[in-house]
Amino acid sequence: MPRLTKEKIKNKLNYHYKAFDRKTISPDPLEFPHRFTNNKDIEIAAFIASVFAYGGVAQIIKSLESVFQIMGNDPFDFVTNYNHNKDKTLFANIKHRFYSGEDTAALFAGLNKIYTTYGSLNYLFLLYYFEKADNIKGALSFFSNNLTNIVVKSSKISSSGINFMFPDPLKGSACKRQNLFLRWMIRKDELDFGLWKEIPTDKLVIPVDTHIAQISQKLKLTKLKNVSWKMAEEITNNLKKIDSNDPVKYDFALCHIGMRKLDF
């Protein structure tokens, strides 16, 4: 990649941000919440899509198709009426990298508990969110640990797959999947839903995977070599120099430029 000035990087980022819209989503797990119009269905669909958003995109889409086929056309109704003892066998054949069918069933047991107790994931997250915090790191740590505890207690199983679902930023994880879900819920444009209106977009941290890391290194948005929460914050802070209010808006474009091997 030729050396680019900050102004050229800004112009190119804004160009690519505008180039990706609803018609260019596929292939991406974001396709799944866009199948729904009810906000409760969207929130659940987005959360499940984000939990499975690791590995090759073809495998992600295949696994999510299987899970959404089981849920049917009403994710909120499925979750709120889910009975773990009776329904856990529905997921017996779901395997996605580190997740077993038992792990996926446990996830739905946890979601049932959350929605019947709190009414939404939004409410649960806001219990730990403080406006004066620099970003969502602290709230996300509490959220992730609480999610793990609820899933384990609701399903009465603990596994490496369940622990992998909700990593902790305070332990250094980049937390790509949680940051992806938060981007979808907090930002509002043609791709993201903006359902969680209590949190400003400048509190978000970019979801970092190998695609984001590699292109960010080439653009000098990070000096770090290893994917971590520290890298995610560094990239986000550099993107704030381009858009201080909404730095994470460039995430989808950056990711898909890497995934689709497009020229920046």
Image (cartoon, rainbow, N blue to C red):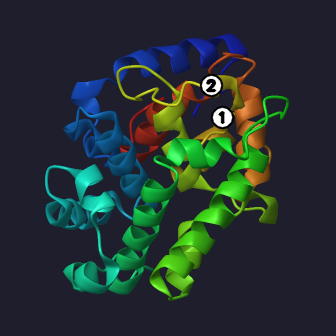
Quadrant including the N terminus: top right
Residue 25 is tagged as none
SS class of the residue under badge 2? helix
Q: In this orientation, does residue 209 appear? A: no
Q: Is residue 87 left or right of residue 138?
A: left
Judging depth in this view, the residue of 163 and 249 nearest the camera is: 163
Looking at the image, residue 120 lies above or below residue 106 = above
- Of residues 31 and 253, the one drawn nearer to the viewer in this rendering: 31
- Going 14% across and 57% down the picture, which residue do you hit? 72
Disc 2: which residue: 201
Few, some or many C-alpha atoms within 10 Å of disc 1 (few <14, some 14-19, many ≥20)?
many
Q: Residue at x 42, y 52 (%)?
A: 47
Q: In which quarter of the view is residue 144 placed?
A: bottom right
Quarter of the rendering containing residue 53:
bottom left
Q: Which residue is mark 1?
A: 204
Q: Are marks 2 and 1 in contact (CB under 8 Å)?
A: yes
Q: Nearer the viewer, residue 105 or 153?
A: 153
User: Nearest the camera: 258 or 154?
Assistant: 154
> Which x, y percent locates residue 77?
24, 54
| Real-space Cα separation, disc 2 to disc 1, in angstroms | 6 Å
The percent position of residue 10, horizontal first and vertical second, equals 62, 15
Q: Residue at coordinates 56% horizontally, 52% vertically from top-left?
A: 178
